[in-house]
Amino acid sequence: MSAQPLGGPHYLNAGFKMIMRPGLRMYVLLPLSINIMVFFGLIYFAVQRFNGWVAQLMPNLPSWLSFLDYILWPLFVVLVLLIIFFTFTTIANLIASPFNSFLAEKVESIARGEDTAAPFSWGELLAMVPRTLWREMRKLGYFLPRALGLLILSFIPGVNIIAAPLWVVFNIWMMAVQYIDYPADNNKVSWGLMLEWLRVKRWLSLGFGGITYLVLMVPLLNLVAMPAAIAGATLLWVDHYKVIDKS
């Protein structure tokens, strides 16, 4: 079965349907509550600072190029929105990572027709915290150097024009990394092997990351989209990881 980018919307849609199952509600509602608190806190903070951030990032153009302000301003508004967006998803996923792993485990057992995952247990959830937090820190270690490079690029006059589109591509890739890592980690697939698999399935990964990125950019809908993305990524993993194993 070839991995096509059009598979991305299919898996996210399947993820939305999956999280509506009665047996998964506890796995969805708890991280959803956390995400709501983080979301509104970050939005409140961002509204206070938004104009200042855009002004700081905008290049100082000579007067004869001032007409470019009208072109560049929307690009840097997008850049700030992207930074805010990824900050929110990073914080929310860091806090909710044990719940997310639990959800991915349950979805995988249902998808494989086994449904042998244990019922929700606070004790088991707490036991997962060290492993899931370590994996989230590994994601941050992957993300931060690349994000820093893009941020530095954003302050270089002339060159910073390409910063916003590069942020878009990078965020799309990180959406695939972020969510497909949950089923990979549950199956004890190493970080390096997971990244290698994503590169092999690049177009499928980017297709899933792209549609997830678009949906997560929609306020309020993004709160429900996070667990749907975890479920969708898990379904994608179940369908396609075995292809790599046999290749």
Image (tube, grey):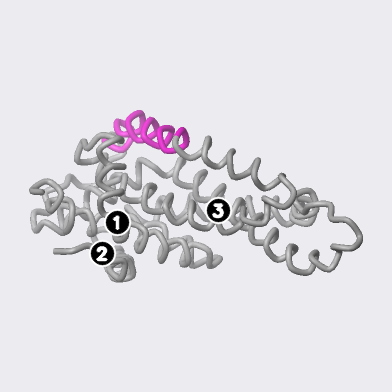
* Residue hosting label 1: 233
Q: Which three-letter amino acid code belongs to the residue tagged 2?
A: Pro
Q: CA distance from mark 1 to mark 3?
A: 22 Å
Secondary structure of the residue carrying numbered label 1: helix
Q: CA distance from mark 1 to mark 2?
A: 20 Å
* Residue hosting label 3: 167
Residue 143 horizontal/vertical position (percent): 48, 40
Residue 22 horizontal/vertical position (percent): 25, 64
Q: Which three-letter amino acid code belongs to the residue tagged 3?
A: Trp
In the image, residue 50 sits, relative to residue 120, either above or below, namely below
Q: CA distance from mark 2 to mark 3?
A: 37 Å
In the image, residue 186 sits, relative to residue 12, either above or below, namely above
Residue nearest the observer in this picture, 51 or 65: 65
- Looking at the rendering, the stretch of residues picked out in magenta corresponds to 124-141
Q: Main secondary structure of the magenta part?
A: helix
Q: Give the position of the N terminus as an image quadrant.
A: bottom left
